[in-house]
Image (cartoon, rainbow, N blue to C red):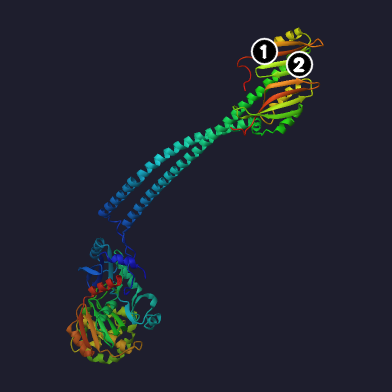
Amino acid sequence: MKYSFIKPREKNFLSLFSKIWVVFISLMVLFMLAFNFYIVIEAKFFKQGVVELVSQREELESRIDHDDEDIGIILRQKALSEEIFSNNTLLKESMKNLFDLVPDQITLKKVQMERNSLVLYGVAPTQDTFNFLLAAPLKSIFHTSNTTFYLTSEGWYNFVSINKILGMDGMRE
Amino acid sequence: MGIKTMIQKKFQNLFVCVVFNENECTLRCKVVQNDAIKKTFSKTFSIEFSQEALDQNVENYIIALQEEYQFVYIAFLLNSMGQGAIEGYNNASFKKYDVDVHNVHHTTISNLWSVYASNIEIKWAKNLFSEIGLDLIYSPFIILNDFVISQKLKNKPTCYILNCQDFFVLAIFEDRKVHFGAFFKTQSDTSFAHSSETNDWETEEKEENIAAVGELPEIEETDNDEMSDLADIGDIDDFRSVDSFSDMDDVKTLGHFQGLNEVSQEDSSLELYGRDLLVYKYLKSSLEEYYHNPVYKSEFLEEIIIFDGYEISSDLIRQLEDELMMDVEIHKVDVADRMCDIAIKEIFA
Amino acid sequence: MVCVSNIDRSLEKIDIMKLLLFLMAFIVITFSIVFLMIIPNVKEHRVLQTEHKRVLVHKTRVENLYLEREAELSRLKIENDAVIKAFKHAFTQEEFIAYAGTFFTDVRLTQVTKSDYKKEFVEYELNVTSTLKTPTNFYSFLEGLNRYSSIVQADFPIHLESGKDSITSTFKLKVYDLNATR
């Protein structure tokens, strides 16, 4: 029943003084909680980051290992190929040297090159021609040299020269 | 609102009802908590009535109470002119009884009748309490209504009066509906007087009475003429002017009331003094207004029931019974106390 | 219906009790939040931050190492591209015969059983006939072997026999074969 001419005033549970305090305290609490929240979030971020970084690092490490392997393979291949190529070159040089050694007078019929030996079959005009022109350099290269001469009907000498290198020299299989 | 009030009920709520009586200010206070009245106390201050502000003692006391209690409701019994009661509650009703609805605050009772008070008076009241605040303003009609409905209802129209020291209100009830209402001040208000002289019109009246005795025969003739003038009672402005009895000496303004004065003297076989006389005069003029003004549905009133918060002399009662031919019932009441209860009910449903 | 404005005198006469109570409440709440929540969280934050920094530095170091390796690997790949290709290239007899055919006429290639060790190589015997009297194409052949699309090593025994207008020769060839047990 509304009998009064005027409406009564609003009654507050909290006076202005209390209201100010309440607002102030809640604001402070809010700030502190916000700060705390920020700290917690950042800490979580760091935690996550650590896990991520560790896994990344581990992956990188495995990749490095893999790369190392690949590098090893390549280096090995390189070394191997260089060895092979130098061997091939050496072989070529030896052949060249050998054939350069042979003077015009002497004709080679057959050459048997082994790792540690060289057998030459050829024809020389005189024994001396062979001895002087071929045997001497052969002797300097090989440890042992044996030459056998066979006189042909034409007056030329067939020779068989067996040259050996003893020891660990030469290419090993 | 509902939840707030419910929580508020759990706390101590102080209701302070302020009633002005002549040179006194009475504060009736009740402390309510959990729908129970915990404490009741009163304090009366002797004050010099001022138009602008409350007496400092009263203010300080109330401020102290406001500091003591968390929830304080201050209710004021409006004792100024410019208020009344009419039948109906819509704009048409206000127009019918010549009340400008835009100049008044009004309240509807039971969707049957309305109480109104001038905006100026409301503003004045609020201003008076500006230092301490005002929550409720009650018209004496509300208090009267509360007393009326607390009694067994009469099945025929009855005249009810609420009598206080400074004023009285009159309302003609049929069942729960008010047909006619009037507010009369019986105490001079210096604010309305343009002259600064304090009017001891009680003494004046006595003088008048004495003076009138000798003139009795003459007055009879003027009787009939005056009666028609009484039809104008429904006008607020007239009610205002009723107050300034300092003008009694001036013939120009209150012609018909002067006539009234003379009339009653003619009728009474006993002598009524001072206030009682005034009450009788007002009552009689109100009844006559009620009977003769076609705007009011009028039936013959057989009973007057008076709720007395001040004092009614047996002389007056006898006068009413003899002259007006009506049964008079008196009930002694505590106005401030009842107002407090009304305030409590209004706030806490 | 206008209400009288609310008169709040709470700021004029300050209630000391209330002030102290609020102050107390504020202090208690602030301290409890700081000591129960903020301090431990900040500690944890600090620990995690330093660890994060440490791990980051570590990872960056490793990353730099990795980049270094990658650079080196790509460099080696570029430098040794021919050799790498050659190692990968599957040796086919037809192909080699075609190659040898550029130097010699009458090329024959036969596979010889592998020896037990040196498992990466497959051995072949190469019989060629050269039309020239001089062994120059042998030199070119051997030189070209190093640039061949597979890895091939010429090895002893090497037999040469001169015929009427040609020289027949026999080489041992060792061909690098990826598919041999590695």
First-in-chain label (1 vs 2): 2
Residue at point 72%, 18% (across, down): A111
Residue at 22%, 90% (x, y): give it.
B323
Q: Helix, strand or loop at disc 2?
A: strand
B256, above or below A79, in the image: below
- In this view of the protein, which residue sits in the foreground, B61 or B167? B61
State which quarter of the image contains the C terminus of chain B: bottom left
Q: Which residue is mark 1?
A: A141
Q: Which residue is mark 2?
A: A108
Residue C68 at x, y = what percent? 55, 32
Residue B345 vertical placement versus C90 (above, below): below
- Residue at horizontal 66 percent and vertical 14 percent from the top: A164
Disc marking residue C84: none
> Residue C36's x, y, as percent?
33, 46
Q: In the visual, does B101 lie left or right of B281? A: right
- Amino acid at circle 2: Leu
Q: Nearer the viewer, residue C19 or B74?
A: C19
Could you give the CA–CA distance between mark 1 and mark 2, rounded to whole angstroms? Answer: 18 Å
Q: Is residue B287 visible?
A: yes
- Circle 1 crowding by C-alpha within 10 Å: few under 14, some 14–19, many from 20: few
